[in-house]
C-alpha cells in the first residue's frame, strides 16, 4: 500500500476510452494525449509484442505467418486478455514517457451491456498492466457528460453512442441511467456488411481497412444531394488476380441497410420503453448522437424521419466518451455517483 501511494505521486491519473476501433487517453490536466487504433502485433511463437496502435494497424492483413496483428477488443469487450493487458501497459507507459514506476488511477469507459465477468476482465487487465486503482463508467453516461448534457437534472436526456463494436442507447436523469440498451451492431458490422456485399455482388474480396475507407468516403444512411462514386481495389475471386472497380453511394447504402435499420429499430424500442415524463423531455430536447458510427452520412436525417424528433450530432462525436471520462476524473464526487 505504501509503495502504491509512493508510485501514485509520480503518476498522473488517466481516463481511457478502451473501445474496439480506437483507444483514446486523457492525462489529467493535459486533455487528450493519445488517439491510437486498438490493434496489437505479436510474434506468433514467442508472443512478444512487436507493435501497438498505428504501427500495428498498418500491418493488418499484411503480416507474414510468424506475426499476428489482432484487435484485443471485440464488440466493446476484451476478446484476448493477455494482448489487451499488453496494450493497456503500452499506452500507460507511452503517456508517462516510458517511466516504468508509474501506478496511475484510471477511469475506463465500458459498454452498458457488459456482464460481471467482462467487467472483472477489464479491471484485471488494467491492474495487471500496473494501474493503482480502476473505476468503470458506462459509455453512454460518459458520452452524455462529454457532450455537456445536464445529467444531474430531473429531466430526460437521450444519447445514442455508435462506436466500433457496440451501439449504446441510454436515457439519463438525476446522474443515473433510467433505461439503457446495448447492441453489438456498430461500425465493425457496417465494415463487414460492405465486405460481404462486394464479395456477393462483384466476386471481389476486399480487406477491412478498404471497407472502412469505403464507409467513410461514400457510405450513407440517407440519399445525399449529389451521387458519389469511388474506385476500389481488391482480389477477383474468379480470376484470382487484383482488380479495380467503381462503386457508388447507392450500392453502399444497400450494403449498410441491415446494420443501419438495426440501430434505428433499437432507438424506437428505447423510446417505447422510456417512462412517459422523460419521453416528454426527449420530445423537446431530442436525441444526441455521439461515437464514430454516428458520423455516417445522412444517419441524423434518417433518424429524424423515422422518429420525428430533433436529432443533434455532437460537436466532436469521436471524442465524446473520452471527454466525459476525463471530466469525471476531475470530479471525484461525480465519479463516485456515476461509476459502476
Image (cartoon, rainbow, N blue to C red):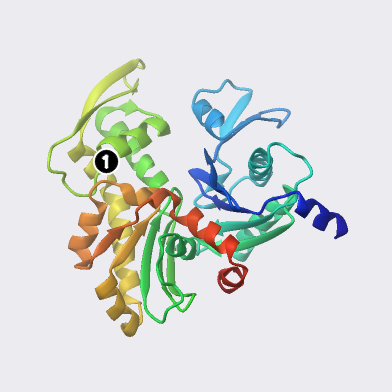
Mark 1 neighbour density, 10 Å: few (under 14) some (14–19) many (20 or more): many
Residue 114 in view (yes/no): no
Locate the N terminus and report the quarter of the image it occupies: bottom right
Residue at the image point whose x is 48% and y is 43% from the top: 21
Relative to 210, is 34 on the left or the right? right
| Kind of element beneath mark 1 | loop
In-front residue for pair 284/291: 284
Residue at the image point whose x is 14% and y is 36% from the top: 227
Q: Quadrant of residue 45?
A: top right
Q: Looking at the image, is 156 positioned above or below residue 221? A: below
In-front residue for pair 48/197: 48
Residue at the image point whose x is 54% and y is 57% from the top: 326
Relative to 318, is 60 on the left or the right? right
Q: Residue furthest right?
A: 2
Q: Quadrant of residue 150?
A: bottom left
Which percent across, then down, holds residue 301? 20, 55
Which percent across, then down, holds residue 232? 29, 25
Residue 198 in view (yes/no): yes
Q: Residue furthest front?
A: 29
Question: Which residue carries the number 1 mark?
Answer: 219
Which percent across, then down, holds residue 112? 50, 64
- The number of numbered badges drawn on the structure is 1
Q: Quadrant of residue 206?
A: top left
Q: Looking at the image, is 21 positioned above or below residue 315? A: above
Locate the C terminus and report the quarter of the image it occupies: bottom right
Q: Looking at the image, is 276 positioned above or below residue 40? A: below
Residue at the image point whose x is 49% and y is 55% from the top: 323
Amino acid at each position: 500500500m505504501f509503495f502504491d501511494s509512493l508510485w501514485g505521486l509520480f503518476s498522473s491519473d488517466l481516463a481511457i476510452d478502451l473501445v474496439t476501433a480506437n483507444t483514446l487517453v486523457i492525462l489529467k490536466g493535459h486533455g487528450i494525449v493519445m488517439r491510437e487504433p486498438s490493434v496489437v502485433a505479436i510474434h506468433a511463437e514467442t508472443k512478444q509484442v512487436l507493435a501497438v496502435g498505428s504501427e500495428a494497424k498498418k500491418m493488418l492483413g499484411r503480416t507474414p505467418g510468424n506475426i499476428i496483428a489482432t484487435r484485443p477488443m471485440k464488440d466493446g469487450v476484451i476478446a484476448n486478455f493477455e494482448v489487451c493487458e499488453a496494450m493497456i501497459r503500452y499506452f500507460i507507459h507511452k503517456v508517462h514517457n516510458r517511466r516504468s514506476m508509474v501506478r496511475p488511477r484510471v477511469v475506463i469507459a465500458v459498454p452498458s451491456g457488459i456482464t460481471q465477468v467482462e467487467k472483472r476482465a477489464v479491471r484485471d487487465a488494467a491492474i495487471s498492466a500496473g494501474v493503482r486503482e480502476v473505476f468503470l463508467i458506462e459509455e453512454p453516461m460518459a458520452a452524455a457528460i462529454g457532450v455537456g448534457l445536464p445529467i444531474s437534472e430531473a429531466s430526460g436526456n437521450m444519447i445514442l453512442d455508435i462506436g466500433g463494436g457496440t451501439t449504446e442507447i441510454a436515457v439519463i436523469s438525476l446522474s443515473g441511467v433510467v433505461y439503457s440498451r446495448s447492441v453489438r451492431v456498430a461500425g465493425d458490422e457496417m465494415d463487414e456488411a460492405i465486405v460481404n456485399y462486394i464479395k456477393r455482388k462483384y466476386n471481389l474480396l476486399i480487406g477491412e481497412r478498404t471497407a472502412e475507407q469505403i464507409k467513410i468516403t461514400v457510405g450513407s444512411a440517407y440519399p445525399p444531394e449529389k451521387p458519389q462514386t469511388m474506385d476500389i481495389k481488391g482480389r477477383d475471386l474468379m480470376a484470382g488476380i487484383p482488380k479495380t472497380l467503381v462503386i457508388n453511394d447507392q450500392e453502399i447504402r444497400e450494403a449498410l441497410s441491415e446494420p443501419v435499420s438495426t440501430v434505428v429499430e433499437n432507438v424506437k424500442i428505447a423510446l417505447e420503453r422510456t417512462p412517459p415524463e422523460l419521453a416528454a423531455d426527449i420530445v423537446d430536447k431530442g436525441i444526441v448522437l455521439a461515437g464514430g458510427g454516428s458520423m455516417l452520412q445522412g444517419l441524423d436525417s434518417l433518424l429524424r424521419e423515422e422518429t420525428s424528433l430533433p436529432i443533434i450530432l455532437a460537436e466532436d462525436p469521436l471524442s465524446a466518451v473520452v471527454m466525459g471520462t476525463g471530466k469525471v476524473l476531475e470530479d471525484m464526487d461525480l465519479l463516485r455517483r456515476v461509476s459502476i
